Amino acid sequence: MKINRNYLNLQDSYLFSTIAKKVNAFRAANPDREIIRLGIGDVTKPLAPVVVKGLVSASEDQGRAETFHGYGAEQGCDFLKEKVRLYYLEKGVELESDEIFISDGAKSDLGNILDIFSADNTVLIPSPVYPVYVDTNVMDGRRIIHVKATEENGFLPLPDQKIKCDIIYLCSPNNPTGAVYDKAQLGKWVEYALSNDAVILFDSAYEAFIGEKELPTSIYQIKGAEKCAIEFCSLSKTAGFTGTRCGYTVVPKALVRENVVLNSLWLRRQTTKFNGVSYVVQRGAEQVFTPEGYRQTREAIAYYKENAKIISDTLTELGIWHTGGKNSPYIWLKCKDGYDSWQFFDYLLESIGVVGTPGVGFGEEGEGFFRLTAFNTKENTQKAMALFRTLYEK
């Protein structure tokens, strides 16, 4: 028996596990101190009423013989896939139903999609970046090339024709920096992928936060992307499904490599290794795409965007360089002079009880930066920013 020794190349613990340990240790030593969490991107607003109604109704269906549902299609129920198809159509993107796969969230599929690619592929990943992109490829032993996302390029790196790769990870709006690619910039990545026979894995989990109409909310709004890109999206932040779990992945049938349609490989993988999202959850998710569901979930998104504005406005007033927030729930800021990312984490926790995420946890290029999220309550966000002022206005 041999283990997968690639796992030994991973860091000892996942970034957010390390943060949790630090916070728990601080809480144990300071039981009376208030802690405000602006670190992990979990939501605080409850599910929309129309979603809850859909979940309750579907649960009742499961209690009646005439409406009971057992095993469903591994790739998702038709009623939800049709709603997603129409959602894309409103963006100007035409999809077929069997190009849409319902999942339990973008994180799962972003890791599982690697099953259909050889471990011999070279992977291009921006730095800083969501750690799952890196870790899942380390687990498989793939060669990883990092492209630098920096203050100079607005944390939106563009392709370099001198670099050759097979798989490209892009996230827009970006986690952790909050930066958003425009159509021209995404167009350069699509051109690069097509000319190099590469595949883009496009994470659009935060697309619902984009408010500027000229910015793309799907890579398929870029000509030719259907021939080189797989898109992942989640209802976690769009509709507060972090604890309910539902998302979707689009694999166009026009995406062909080595004379094989990747859609068929993904279908085969899912029908073998995945039993599908529960009927109850899919009925709740269906309501997200109704007119009332859209209105209610956008109200929650507007609430978080107001929190982001509170953070951004405060940082601006204090003269702290930052990006993100406008079209994203994340704010990416420079650490206070003299502090590295983890030192700044400890400084904020110990001084004012505010928890964020050290930028270096997202990659080497994140050193000296820090991520705050807009997913706490408005009251806690305002309180955290008032505490921030006490550190910078001394």
Image (tube, rainbow, N blue to C red):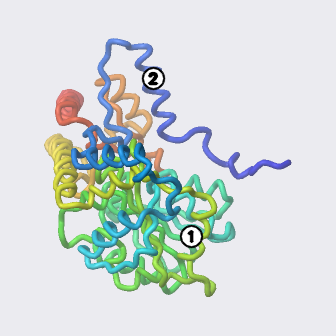
* Quarter holding residue 338: top left
Question: What residue sits 28% from the left and 24% below the top?
Answer: 352
Tell me the SS state at disc 1: helix
* Quarter holding residue 186: bottom left
Question: What residue sits 67% from the left and 58% below the top?
Answer: 140
Tell me, for residue 24, which label it has, or none.
Answer: 2
As drawn, 48 above or below 179: above
- Depth check, front residue: 260 or 389: 260
Tell me, for residue 288, which label it has, or none.
Answer: none
Q: Is residue 147 left or right of residue 344?
A: right
Q: Amino acid at mark 1?
A: Trp
Question: What residue sits 33% from the left and 46% below the top?
Answer: 55
- Report the number of numbered marks: 2
Tell me the SS state at disc 2: helix
As drawn, 228 above or below 289: below
Whether residue 101 is visible, yes or no, is: yes
Instruction: Give how far across and how far down residue 185 sits, in percent.
Output: 33, 75
Instruction: Give how far across and how far down residue 330 sits, in percent.
Output: 30, 49
Decide which of tag 2 and tag 1 comes sooner along the chain: 2
As drawn, 155 above or below 64: below
The residue pinned by badge 1 equals 266
Instruction: Give how far across and how far down residue 343 sits, in percent.
Output: 42, 33
**Which marked residue is nearer to the observer: mark 2 or mark 1?**
1
* Quarter holding residue 389: top left
Instruction: Give how far across and how far down residue 385 sits, in percent.
Output: 20, 34
